[in-house]
Amino acid sequence: MSTRITVATAWLDGCSGCHMSFLDLDERLLELIEHVEIVYSPLVDTKELPERVDVGILEGSISSEDDLEKARQFRERCALLISLGDCAVTGNVPAMRNQFPLAAVLDRAYRENVTLQPQIPTRNVPALRVPVKPVHGEVKVDLFVPGCPPSADAIWTVLSELIAGRIPDPNSVTRFGA
Ligand code: SF4
């Protein structure tokens, strides 16, 4: 029977940079998979989040109805939920739109700055929420790992502590915007 801890990751409204930082573990990934089973993530092929997961890691803020649904699903199914990166922890870049009306933001992106067929997409795109929130603005978060993105070393420290059965203190290895 596997004794590896199960980990699921997802990116909400983020740039994927936090997941890229995860990949920056480089050769340490080989050591990691001795202790961790990634059961759901953009980094693996699995399409369904299992019913029970030990550790959930969310990148990005909650900006759309899809983000909210995913965050709630992670909270429900993951024993420990981590906000990874400044967008998840504070709203960061996605939350910059909060100071403008949503209609003005859409106009700016899809009409004012477009030369060919300016139009605001309404079909097959997730509905945007107002305001954009950090993950803990909607669901309970157990651990915050700031940084834009958090360094691979910080991610390694956090995961190593969890593997050892300890709750890590990310403050010693992270800082906002670093
Ligand atoms: S915290 Fe930075 S690196 Fe991570 S998703 Fe946000 S903008 Fe990208």
Image (spheres, rainbow, N blue to C red):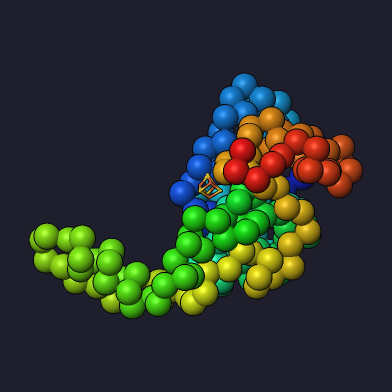
Place of residue 138 in the rendered image (x, y in percent of width and height, measured from the top left): 65, 72
Can residue 8 be seen in this snapshot?
Answer: no
Residue beneath the point at 52% across and 38% down: 20
Q: Say left or right for 152 vs 131.
A: right
Question: Is 50 rendered above or below residue 29?
Answer: below
In the picture as drawn, the residue positioned furthest to the left comes out as 116
Near-viewer residue (51 or 172): 172
Residue 58 quadrant = bottom right
Residue 149: image location, x then y, percent: 58, 41
Instruction: Give me the residue at 89% from left, 43% from top.
Output: 166
- Residue at the spot x=11%, y=66% of the render? 117
**Which quadrant does the N terminus fall into?**
top right
Q: Can residue 131 be seen in this snapshot?
A: yes
Figure label count: 0
Residue 160 drawn at (x, y percent): 79, 35
The picture places residue 129, in percent across and down from the top left corner, at: 48, 76
131 left or right, relative to 56: left
Left or right of residue 22, residue 97 in this image: left
Indicate the quadrant where residue 92 lies: bottom right
Q: Residue at x 52, y 74 (%)?
A: 131
The answer to whether 164 is drawn above or below residue 93 in the figure is above
- Please state, as top left, top right, bottom left or bottom right, where the C terminus lies in the image: top right
Q: Residue furthest front?
A: 99
Relative to 113, say whether 84 is above or below: above
User: Is 99 in front, or is 71?
Assistant: 99
Which sits in the foreground, 44 or 118? 118
